[in-house]
Image (tube, rainbow, N blue to C red):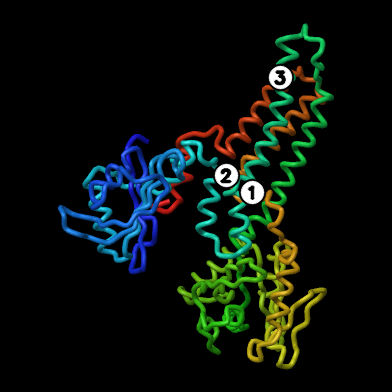
């Protein structure tokens, strides 16, 4: 990290302002080579009116922010150039800085430097990306909890509990002559371990809500051709997203859209009508639809009110029995011929725009959307972190089994240290370079 990096931190395009960010020990000196005024004499945390020059030729009128180490995001000298948002202007300034000695930053490298320099931990780093990608107030609140360190605090408290147990064991082993130190044994460890396991399980349980807030609910609409799947999608989205005709098999590929219910995103996919067909193209769409059933978190199964349920539809209903699904009966304005056994269903009419509100209420009820609350800022929404916590639980179960088998306490200590290290991986106290490369490669270029 000895070199100085540069990148465009705003979306490149026509706009009012573009921001070019520079970070490193030479940030101020290198930017100073293309400005009219002497930036080396400016105070830290100031915004300065200036011009960008190319061999004394004015390129743009800009505002230059200076943040000197260690009080910056990366804990290095940081300079941000606020220029006019034209593509040509922005690229020209970037080109000049690279000519003067800056290196083009890799995706996420500014945030990576913030982590490596101790400014943030890994949970907070992931929170940066979540803040950038947040589309609702709830997902923003969740991301800010990670960014503000509240989720990290939870993990650190668990590590503190573990280090207290480990320290006591080591004192007992290394200094047995210290009678004023309580000798800890397996039966003393078990209740403390149960408490740690309970807290980890609470985090894992909350992850379901956290992932719904962060990523939304993957929802698919299925049914045979011409039952009104595309019409339902259009009503949910309040736009004519999908083509609607009376011809069966009109939808041959998936059509996607997004809606928000109580601040939670539903990623809705209208699938091709599921039926046996000799049409090669339509058959590919049917196969896609069947595959999506296994991936979906919510299935909306559409049936026709004025038609008897077919054998294929009954088989489809049996296939989704163990999934989150809602049966929607369309065309309730027509004569009823459909008969379902012990099936609670939502009756709608896409023609008369009836039943859509009831469907949304059923989705809210199924996922407890009105009860998901981001005021408790102890959610962890990273699948990486949850995977580590599940590994940790496996080790806890091994320790419990070892305690029941009267394993020596010094052997128990080895597994306790492994848990402590695993929890350290979540916040980045322990890590490997490959993990960091994978994590930060998901970030935007200028972040």
User: Crowding near pointer 2: few (<14 within 10 Å), some, many (20+)?
Assistant: many
Q: CA distance from mark 1 to mark 3?
A: 31 Å
Q: Secondary structure at mark 3?
A: helix
Image-based side of 56 in relation to 236, left or right: left
Mark 2–mark 1 contact, CB under 8 Å? yes
Closer to the chain start, of discs 1 and 3, is: 1
Image-based side of 320 in relation to 42, left or right: right
Where is residue 116 drawn, in percent x and y? 47, 36
User: Crowding near pointer 1: few (<14 within 10 Å), some, many (20+)?
Assistant: many
Closer to the chain start, of discs 3 and 2, is: 2
**Residue to which mark 1 is pinned:** 380
Q: How many marks?
A: 3
Image-based side of 18 in relation to 255, left or right: left
**Residue to which mark 3 is pinned:** 411
Dot in front, 1 or 3: 1
Residue located at (33% from left, 48% from top): 6
Vertical side of 137 occupied by 191: above or below: above
Image-based side of 61 in relation to 10, left or right: left
**Residue to which mark 2 is pinned:** 123
User: Crowding near pointer 3: few (<14 within 10 Å), some, many (20+)?
Assistant: few
Q: Secondary structure at mark 2?
A: helix
């Amino acid at each position: 990290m000895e070199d100085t990096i540069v990148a465009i931190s705003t979306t490149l395009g026509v706009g009012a302002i573009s921001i070019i960010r520079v970070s490193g020990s030479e940030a101020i000196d290198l930017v100073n080579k293309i400005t009219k005024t002497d930036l080396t004499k400016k105070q830290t945390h100031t915004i300065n009116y200036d011009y960008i020059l190319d061999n004394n030729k004015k390129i743009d009128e800009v505002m230059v922010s200076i943040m000197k180490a260690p009080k910056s995001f990366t804990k290095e000298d940081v300079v941000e150039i606020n220029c006019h948002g034209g593509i040509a202007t922005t690229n020209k300034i970037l080109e000049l800085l690279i000519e003067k000695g800056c290196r083009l930053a890799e995706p996420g490298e500014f945030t990576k430097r913030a982590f490596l320099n101790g400014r943030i931990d890994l949970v907070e780093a992931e929170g940066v990306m979540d803040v950038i990608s947040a589309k609702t107030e709830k997902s923003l609140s969740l991301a800010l909890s990670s960014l503000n360190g509240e989720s990290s605090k939870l993990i650190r408290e668990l590590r503190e509990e573990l280090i207290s147990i480990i320290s006591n064991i080591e004192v007992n082993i290394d200094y047995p002559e210290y009678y004023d130190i309580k000798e800890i044994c397996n039966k003393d460890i078990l209740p403390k371990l149960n408490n740690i396991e309970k807290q980890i399980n609470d985090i894992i349980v909350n992850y379901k809500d956290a992932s719904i807030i962060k990523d939304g609910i993957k929802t698919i609409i299925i049914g045979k051709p011409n039952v009104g799947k595309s019409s339902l999608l259009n009503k949910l989205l309040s736009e004519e997203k999908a083509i609607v005709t009376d011809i069966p098999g009109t939808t041959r590929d998936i059509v996607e859209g997004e809606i928000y219910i109580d601040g939670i995103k539903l990623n809705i996919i209208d699938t091709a009508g599921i039926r046996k067909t000799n049409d090669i193209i339509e058959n590919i769409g049917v196969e896609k639809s069947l595959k999506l059933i296994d991936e979906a978190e919510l299935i909306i199964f559409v049936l026709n009110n004025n038609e008897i349920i077919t054998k294929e539809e009954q088989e489809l209903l049996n296939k989704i029995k163990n999934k989150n699904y809602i049966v929607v009966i369309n065309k309730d304005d027509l004569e009823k011929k459909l008969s379902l056994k012990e099936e609670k269903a939502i009756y709608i009419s896409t023609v008369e725009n009836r039943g859509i509100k009831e469907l949304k209420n059923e989705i809210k009820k199924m996922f407890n959307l009105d009860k998901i609350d981001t005021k408790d800022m102890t959610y962890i929404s990273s699948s990486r972190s949850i995977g580590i916590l599940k590994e940790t639980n496996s080790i806890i179960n091994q320790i419990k089994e070892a305690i029941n088998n009267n394993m020596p306490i010094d052997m128990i200590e080895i597994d306790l240290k492994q848990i402590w290290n695993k929890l350290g991986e979540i916040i980045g106290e322990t890590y490997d370079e490959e993990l960091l490369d994978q994590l930060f490669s998901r970030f935007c270029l200028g972040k």
